[in-house]
Image: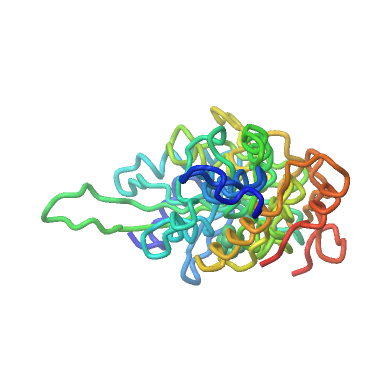
Amino acid sequence: MSWIDNRIEDGVIITSLDWAINWARTSSLWPVTFGLACCAIEMMATGASRFDIDRFGAGAFRPTPRQADLMIVAGTVTYKMASRLKRLYNQMPDPKYVMAMGACTVGGGPYFKHGYHVVKGVDLVVPVDVYIPGCPPRPESLLEGLMRLQDKIRHQTRAKDKVALANRDKLAPLTV
Amino acid sequence: MTPEEISNLLRRTFGDAIEEVVLAGAHPYVVVQADRWPEVAQFLRRDRRLKFNLLRCISSLDLLPDDKLAAVYDLCAVPEATDDKPLVCPHEFAVRVVTNRGNPHIPSVADVWETANWHEREAYDLMGIVFDNHPDLRRILCPDDWQGHPLRKDYVFPKEYHGIPGTTEHELPSPRH
Ligand code: SF4
């Protein structure tokens, strides 16, 4: 943007609105504290000092969905839990993102065959942005999933025109 | 007391309420008639020679070929814990109560052993055994509006629950083992 260079004082940054908002959102993804089964142990490990999810700005696990942007569904979702999960999701303010962590949430996992009570994939209940396979996924995978989600957020736009919206739809769920 | 002594005592006291005695194997048990079971339970709990004060577990069995359901009560007598008496079971025993599959009813023993309350609810929830005179016989694990009793061998897996589709391998009604 050479036409504007040197025309304003120091300490002023010029950027696009999209970039600024996306930067803020990617760097402060607050997850809702939501562990359902064994995968939650790995999620806790990711939050602890060795892996430290706070490096990505996503370490502020909120005890209420109303303060959270991200729901890491870590564990087995049963039919009984599904209604609660949906309710928590509905209580989160927009924009909100969901990560399906572990084989159970991706597609029923080890309970696919014999689990009469397990939802065969959390995407049947809430829309999912990133799928992280593994039983359980290692903390590195969770961090990788988080980075892919940040990539996705970086490409969001506030524009309402058709071209931009069409491009946004191309960024459909990513699999790590 | 040994399992032989316990079963003989029960036989002497209750006669033909004791339908069968199985002492072979690691898990000796007697089969008790369903309608006499509360009496037998009171005796097992209160008798000074037996004093079965701990109900470890209630397991329920689906005996599909015989068209029966059964509940197995694992009992154990725990002595008072004192310094000179280590906490070991002086004796343990099991009781099996068999009921028919079409209309399964077993009298509750929740007033004899407090533990039985939730265990009976679990057996009701997952196997569909109705425990008569239970103080609060509701489902304990599945949602209240769940259809069927999941651990029965002929259970049909749900294809849908409140709008969430379910599926089974090869679209069978329940998985083949
Ligand atoms: S995917 Fe594996 S580790 Fe994760 S909740 Fe399911 S069974 Fe547990």
Quadrant where the C terminus of chain B lies? bottom right
* Residue that sits furthest to the left in the current view: B84
User: Ligand 1 quadrant?
Assistant: bottom right
Decide which of B177, A166 is in the foreground and name it.
Answer: A166
Residue B13 in percent (x, y) is at: 44, 45
Give the residue at x 79% y 55%: B154
* Residue that sits furthest to the bottom in the current view: B25
Residue A131 in percent (x, y) is at: 68, 60
Give the residue at x 67% y 45%: A18
Left or right, A102 with respect to B76, comes to: right
| Residue A119 visible at all | yes
Residue A42 in percent (x, y) is at: 48, 61
| Residue B33 visible at all | no
Q: Quadrant of residue A90?
A: top right
Quadrant where the N terminus of chain B lies? bottom left
Left or right, A5 with respect to B55, comes to: right
Left or right, A29 with respect to B74, comes to: right
Give the residue at x 75% y 44%: B148
Decide which of B90, A162 is in the foreground and name it.
Answer: A162
What sort of colour scheme is used for the picture? rainbow
Give the residue at x 48% y 65%: B27
Q: How many marks?
A: 0
In this view, B168 is above or below B34 = below
Residue B153 in percent (x, y) is at: 74, 58
